[in-house]
Structure formats: C-alpha cells, structure tokens
Image: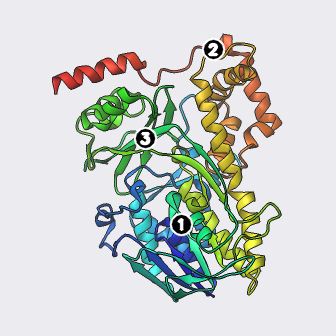
C-alpha cells in the first residue's frame, strides 16, 4: 500500500515506522525544513515553527516505553544510546512511603527521560533507514485529491498518488476543512479549552556535579500554580509551570527569566536543582497558550467512515491538555493501532477505517474525556464550594483522602502511577474497591494526621518576592 503521511513530528514518524515495518511504502511530508542534525545537541537547535511545543517539557510515559520495548526495541536501544535514561518509578519512592518492598508489575512502571528533540531525532534517523520510506522536508501539503461520491475517496495529496493519506499535523490540523473541500459530511468535533498557559525552561547539570535526588513523578499543585520537573537526556532537565490563563500578573512575571528563576528557587521540589553551582539554563523561557482538549471523529454515529482513504493520528485526531503529558505516548499507541488495523484488514480500506475508529474510541477517546474531567475538577478545586454542593464532598475526599493515601499507601501510589502512565483505564483509580477503601480510610483519619506538606509559598508572598526582584533588576 502507498501511504502519504502529512506531518513529520512524532505522530507522523511513528506512523511511518509502524506502517513501513508491515511492508507499506510511506512518504512523509514535513512542512518545516528540518534536515537530519549531526547529534542530539544539534537537534535541540531545530527550527520547528510547525511544532512550537518541542521547546517545552515532554513526558515519555511507561506505556510508550513498554510499547517500544515490545514492538520496536531498536528504537528504545537507540534512545538509550543517545543519552536518554529509563526512570523506574518504584526506585524513586517518596520518603513518606515506608513500605518499600517490590510488587508484581513494578517492572512495567518505567518511563523515559528524554528531550522531545532528542526523541524525534533518534526516531527520524531510524525511520530514514526503513526500506520504502521517504521523508520530504520543507513540503507543506495543500489539498487532498479525491474522487467524488456519497463517501469521497481520497487518492492523494497535491497530485501525489496514495492509497491512504494520514493526517499527522498535530493539534492545529485543518483536516475538517480538507474534508469539507472534497464534499465529505461534516466532521464531528468536541472542543474544550483548558484555561491554562504554561512556561518551560531547560537546564543542564554541571559537569562533575551530582544531580539532586529525583522522586518521581515530581509535580505539585499550589492552586494558583502547578509545577513539575522533567528529566531529560545528557544531564538536561526542564522545569514547567502552569497557571490560569487569566492570571496576567503571574503570567508577566513567569515569562521573564528573572521571574521564572525566582519561582524555581522558591518551590520545595525545584529549589535544589537551581541552587548556585548545580545547573545552568540552556534556553530562555518558552510560553505556550491556547491549550485545549479536542476530538475529531472521522466516522458517523454508526461507525461508518466519512471518507475513504484518509485517517488522522495523534493530536490531529485526539488532543489532550499537554499538562498531563500524554501526547507523545498516545501518538505512538495510535500509530501502531493504525498499522495493526491495516494489517488485519488488508486490501479493505473501509474495514481498516472502521477498525481504526473503534481502536481510537477504545484506547484514546477515554483519555480525552478524562482530561476534560480533570480540567473541570482542577477549576472546581479553586472554588469555595458550599457544603450542599455534591462536588464539595469529592473535593474534600481528593484533598484529604486520595492525596494523603498516595503518600503513604504502596497500593494507592502504584495505582496512581499506573493511571498516570496510561497503563490502566482512566477510571481505574475509583473503580478498584481496594483503592477506594484506602482512600476513604485516609479521609476518615484526616483529623489524626498533620497537615499536608508545604510545597511552596502562598501566592501573595511569591508575588511580593517577584515584585521586589523586578525592582532590583
């Protein structure tokens, strides 16, 4: 089968890799002119106007690492050779977890520490070595070529013929416009704004200096500010903050290097990484706004394709709030799901399209709905809810039950890790009777334990520090 993949980011490259290994001929069209750099450091300087998110922190979750281990071990080996490292979460347990005995399944709870650019560079190198794959840089796809009919049949892009066109252009994909232009039925879209803006900066630990101990996943929510540390490859790491998009005062402060550093040195988790002499910034502050959860279905309510010969993968189909770090992992899952659908329904594009749509609904859409719900819950946590509001009880259980149980129960902690790493279904935490029991027990015991640990300053105190820093500058 001849396949054209539009978009040469991680979703597009993963699709090319997975499909080529089943014998398909694949041409990847990448709008950015990004020829192969010499090494990972040169890749970090890639000009990616079509993918501004490459300058931000990325999570390569256990589900992705395990998929590579099982289905593309050469990719995993190449990433490790390039300086990526494996993070075995159960080897970095929080000190509050006194039961440190191993459990079955711990070997699955392993993620990858890597910069997005390094991951993409390694993947592109290996894709280029695949027989039957061509990668064309600096090519912006214009229009679909299609035969008209009750269900249009896509036959190529801009005159280049293909049996299947794959949209891998990410969250800003215009596939709905493409399909409207060839007479397809309207694409059903669900869109939910996340209401956040986030800020990232990369650093490198100095030679000869031992990095601070990593307890993962290192992330916290202060209410007015969420933050996390992401380990990278080759002694790099990044810090990311997320705030409500309407918080203009904090937004102005964090966008400046001085303000970003003031905050980094004020937070319990990030301060040891920014102590003088430990690390140096290797980028400025990168800002990303307009973040949303979006799902575009290319089938109707009965599961019938709106178009033949065209599918979308990764964020072009199902995009979740990047704060949750699922994009790259789900893109790989989606790409291999497409390859499997094509293999199982050889020479039957309608059958493969239906199978792929069913796979999307089963494996990706639940995480979209979970992200929408998480965003809503995060906003609710900022509200002072009256006691009669049913959300108030769930808010209290989350704060006084789930979070404390995660710090002390090996069962709850591992269940959270499996959920966080996409190894369990989105509802798994609250669908397990043992987990619910431990969470409720922690909630009932709330009066007998000390308050939650202090993770950072109150907003008013931090704003004061930021304003003093601005005056000093």
Residue 411 falls in image quadrant: top right
Residue 387 appears left or right of 239 = right
Q: Determine the CA span between mark 1 and mark 3.
A: 22 Å
Q: Determine the CA span between mark 2 and mark 1.
A: 46 Å
- The answer to whether any part of residue 64 appears in the image is no
Q: Secondary structure at mark 2?
A: loop
Neighbor class of circle 1 (other Cα within 10 Å; few <14, some 14-19, many 20+) is many
Neighbor class of circle 3 (other Cα within 10 Å; few <14, some 14-19, many 20+) is many
Q: Give the residue displayed 54% in from the left and 80% down from the top.
A: 4
Q: Determine the CA span between mark 3 and mark 2.
A: 34 Å
Residue 418: x and y, percent?
Answer: 66, 47
Q: Give the residue displayed 56% in from the left and 19% down from the top.
A: 452
Residue under pointer 3: 198
Residue under pointer 2: 449
Q: Do labels 1 and 3 touch, CB within 8 Å? A: no
| Viewer-side label of 2, 1 | 1
Give whichever of 99, 82 is nearer the camera. Answer: 82
Relative to 140, does residue 56 appear above or below in the rendering?
Answer: above
Residue 198: x and y, percent?
Answer: 43, 41
Q: Secondary structure at mark 3?
A: strand
Residue 382 appears left or right of 388 = left
Residue under pointer 1: 11
Furthest residue in direction top, as rendered: 447
* Image quadrant containing the N terminus: bottom right
């Amino acid at each position: 089968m001849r396949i054209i993949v539009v978009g040469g980011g991680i979703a597009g490259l993963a699709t090319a890799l997975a499909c080529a290994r089943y014998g398909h001929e694949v041409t990847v069209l990448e709008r950015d002119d990004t020829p192969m750099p010499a090494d990972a450091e040169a890749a970090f300087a890639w000009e990616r106007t079509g993918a501004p998110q490459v300058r931000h922190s990325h999570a390569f979750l256990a589900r992705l690492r395990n998929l590579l281990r099982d289905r593309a071990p050469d990719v995993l080996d190449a990433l490790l050779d390039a300086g990526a490292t494996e993070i075995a979460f159960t080897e970095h347990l929080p000190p509050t977890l006194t039961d440190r005995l191993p459990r079955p399944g711990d070997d699955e709870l392993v993620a990858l520490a890597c910069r997005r650019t390094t991951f993409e560079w390694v993947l592109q190198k290996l894709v280029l070595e695949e027989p039957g794959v061509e990668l064309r840089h600096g090519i912006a796809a214009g229009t679909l070529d299609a035969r008209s009919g009750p269900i249009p049949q896509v036959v190529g892009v801009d005159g280049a013929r293909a049996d299947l066109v794959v949209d891998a252009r990410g969250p800003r994909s215009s596939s709905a416009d493409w399909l409207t232009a060839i007479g397809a039925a309207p694409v059903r879209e669900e869109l939910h704004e996340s209401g956040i803006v986030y800020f990232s900066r990369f650093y490198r630990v100095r030679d000869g200096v031992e990095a601070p101990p990593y307890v993962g996943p290192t992330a916290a929510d202060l209410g007015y500010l969420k933050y996390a540390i992401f380990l990278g490859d080759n002694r790099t790491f990044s810090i990311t903050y997320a705030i409500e998009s309407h918080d203009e005062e904090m937004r102005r402060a964090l966008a400046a290097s001085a303000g970003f550093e003031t905050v980094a040195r004020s937070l319990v988790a990030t301060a040891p990484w920014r102590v003088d002499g430990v690390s140096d910034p290797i980028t400025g502050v990168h800002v990303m706004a307009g973040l949303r959860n979006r799902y575009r279905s290319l089938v109707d309510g009965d599961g019938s394709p709106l178009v033949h010969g065209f599918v979308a993968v990764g964020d072009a189909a199902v995009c979740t709030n990047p704060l949750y770090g699922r994009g790259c992992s789900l893109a790989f899952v989606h790409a291999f799901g497409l390859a499997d659908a094509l293999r199982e329904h050889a020479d039957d594009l309608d059958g493969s399209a239906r199978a792929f749509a069913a796979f999307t609904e089963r494996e990706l859409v639940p995480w979209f709905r979970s992200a929408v719900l998480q965003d809503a819950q995060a906003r609710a946590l900022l509200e002072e809810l009256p006691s009669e509001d049913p959300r108030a009880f769930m808010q209290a259980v989350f704060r006084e039950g789930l979070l404390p149980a995660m710090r002390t129960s090996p069962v709850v902690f591992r269940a959270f890790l499996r959920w966080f790493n996409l190894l369990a279904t989105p509802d798994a935490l609250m669908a397990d009777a043992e987990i619910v029991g431990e969470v409720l027990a922690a909630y009932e015991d709330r009066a007998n334990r000390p308050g939650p640990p202090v993770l950072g300053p109150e907003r008013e105190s931090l704003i004061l520090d930021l304003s003093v820093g601005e005056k000093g500058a």
